[in-house]
Amino acid sequence: MMRAILVRQFGGIDQMKVATDVAIPTPGDKQVLIKVICSGVNPVDTYLRSGQYSKLPDLPYIPGKDAAGIVHSAGSLVSRMKPGDRVFMCQTNQLGSLAEFVTANEENAFPLDDKLSFEQGAAIGIPYFTAYRALFQKANAKSGNRVLIHGASGAAGLAAVQIAKANGMHVTGTAGTQEGIDLVRSAGADAVYNHRDKTYLKKLQNGELFDVIIEMLANVNLGHDLKLMNRHGRTIVVGSRGTVTLDPRDMMGREASVTGVALLTATPEEWSEITSAIGDGIKAGWVKPVVNKVYSLEEAGQAHHDIIHSKGAKGKLVVKIQD
Ligand code: NAP
């Protein structure tokens, strides 16, 4: 038996109780069973828990799509990993990573380099994979492009800054606090603006336009993004929490485009491209996940609360499950 957060009904964080008698999952032939040291918290975990997502798991379920830990056992057809290996993983469905053990398909688990901690390992999956997909598979970003990461202080934004800089782009980021601004600058951004400063859009508009915009809060910013794009500019919507008013004419003269991204719809070929590029980044050393705060399993509900309600992101929220 293991400890896990077992959600029996969709709803608030009061549904996130620790259960102590959850059966340890059995890995299939092409799966590994991972002893979870840290679980990464993503905004999507909260949309799922509250029942506000297009595809919901059957109840009861264990939340958590990202994790880092140690391979405990491996199915008979697994060739890339063995018990004892340090790994991080991304993607679960019913039985997630807010638990002492989680299973992962072989293609969703990856070696965790010794230079990264388990906390950092739990911060890689969804943020880095999404940032890569947005920049390259959706925006077709190239070295030398001018890129705006609109919301760069959170987990996905910092990942996007690191990936864009490692690939030779000129990066402008935004954050909502001085600490966030400093963090985005230290991640490599060439310029950083405060998206809570009422004049920041004017400052951005007076500067050079952007080839690529990675948008974390489209319901607030998309109308402005259209005016900030270069000819043939591409805005990629990563995050949005509502509706927005915009003027389509802003796209016409520039022949600019807006595209949505959904990491978990990537094809197996796209997934393999994403994961091997981030694996290369880990080896090269430019994947440097920033962990903001570490919670205990009992505090997992608080982590779900904070990822949606706190202002002033500084990287990733992580739940430490065990040593
Ligand atoms: P996070 O760590 O909570 O970061 C949220 C970011 O939004 C912070 O940088 C925050 O900045 C910024 N923000 C707040 N107000 C803003 C504004 N007015 N304009 C621009 N940015 C603003 O979350 P995350 O993990 O990075 O995810 C970011 C968003 O992407 C979420 O909505 C998430 O659901 C979505 N997402 C989507 C996918 C996908 O496949 N489509 C995958 C991953 C994430 P301050 O706190 O400094 O103000």
Image (tube, rainbow, N blue to C red):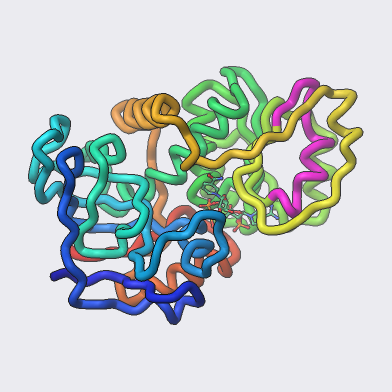
User: Residue 12, percent across and down?
Assistant: 50, 77
Q: Is residue 65 left or right of residue 221?
A: left
Is residue 69 or residue 54 the one in the foreground? 54
Question: How many circles with numbers are drawn on the protein?
Answer: 0
* Quadrant in the rendering for residue 294: bottom left
User: Residue 201, percent across and down?
Assistant: 80, 45
User: Residue 181, percent across and down?
Assistant: 59, 50
Q: Residue furthest front?
A: 58
Residue at figure coordinates x 58%, y 39% from the top left = 261
Residue at figure coordinates x 45%, y 30% from the top left = 267
Residue at figure coordinates x 44%, y 55% from the top left = 316
* Quadrant in the rendering for residue 251: top right
Magenta residues span 218-234
Residue at figure coordinates x 48%, y 72% from the top left = 10
For the N terminus, the quadrant is bottom left
User: Residue 56, percent across and down?
Assistant: 47, 59
Magenta highlight on residue 231: yes
Q: Residue furthest top?
A: 143
Q: Main secondary structure of the magenta part?
A: helix
